[in-house]
Amino acid sequence: MTSIDKAGAFALGDRTVKRLGYGAMQLAGRGVFGPPKDHDAALAVLREAVASGVNHIDTSDFYGPHLTNRLIREALAPYPDDLVIVTKIGALRGPDASWIPAFSPEELTQAVHDNLRNLGVEALDVVNLRLMFDVHGPAEGSIEAPLAALVGLQQKGLVRHIGLSNVTAKQIAEGRRMCEIVCVQNQYNLAHRADDALIDDLARDGVPYAPFFPLGGFSPLQSSTLSAVAARLGATPMQVALAWLLRRAPNILLIPGTASVAHLRENLAAADLELPEHAMTELNGIAGAASA
């Protein structure tokens, strides 16, 4: 079995987590809506992740909705002492599977209670406020009102730590003036590198950055350079993409998702992959080629 300890660890709030974690989004049905195709297989993936050393799981009660958190509870409760479950709030799902912004104090409070109930915990380890000013990516706008509501829930003991998702550097600065921000979660991967400077700034401050869609998400990474490097190293392109992220900055925490035990093991095996400098140089050029 692959030891993910080789990927290292990093502080997340008052805990330390392995840098290779697991994202639960793909456990829901098609379009992150409805139940999984195979309920038992979903439970098996979660149990295999923890058995392999994963102690950082990313989720949300709007996955499904509600279903993914219930799967986590069924598979893993009572939870291991070292397991950190990070969830996110700020959206609802419509009956047509649409994503609906939900930022009012009432909606955020309900979201926290939904997560508490479905995960079966008394307090949430980390809650990311997921901004949806623009569903396609970060967009400027004050986060004071929704973040103040989340801080209020933290003061009541329902939330231990607060993070931000789908945000700009300006919004992070605004958030850090209001409370401690223990992590940032934005889209970032080999081909999508808008947050290069932000990652480096956060690393200097010891703040972890968890890239969502580390493997491209709904549009998996496709690159002849990536495929060529992987072939030379005897690895899969996705393993190389994950290994590149681990090398990119020490504060990057990976949360690749899958609904397959075999794919999970493949992802975790990225911890064993050592990328030589010439490979890093080739891979660093992918983003420029993608934007050309």
Image: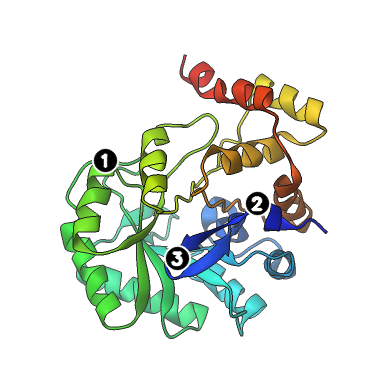
Q: Is residue 243 above or below residue 221?
A: below
- The N terminus is located in which quarter? bottom right
The residue closer to the viewer here, 245 or 98, is 245
Q: Quadrant of residue 155?
A: bottom left
Name the spot of residue 57 as percent of width and height, x first.
Answer: 56, 64
Which residue is disc 2 drawn over? 7
Q: Amino acid at mark 3?
A: Thr
Q: Secondary structure at mark 3?
A: strand
Which residue is at 40% across, 60% downward?
93
Badge 2 vs badge 1, beta-carbon distance below 8 Å: no
Q: Quadrant of residue 105?
A: bottom left
Which residue is disc 1 drawn over? 139
Q: Secondary structure at mark 1?
A: loop
Q: Amino acid at mark 2?
A: Ala
What distance separates the C-alpha of mark 3 from that of mark 2? Answer: 23 Å
Name the spot of residue 21 as percent of width and height, x first.
Answer: 60, 58
**Looking at the image, which residue sits at the far top?**
292
Q: Earlier in the sequence, mark 3 or mark 2?
A: 2
| Residue 73 in view (yes/no) | yes
How is the protein colored in the picture? rainbow
Q: Amino acid at mark 1?
A: Ala
Which residue is disc 3 drawn over? 87
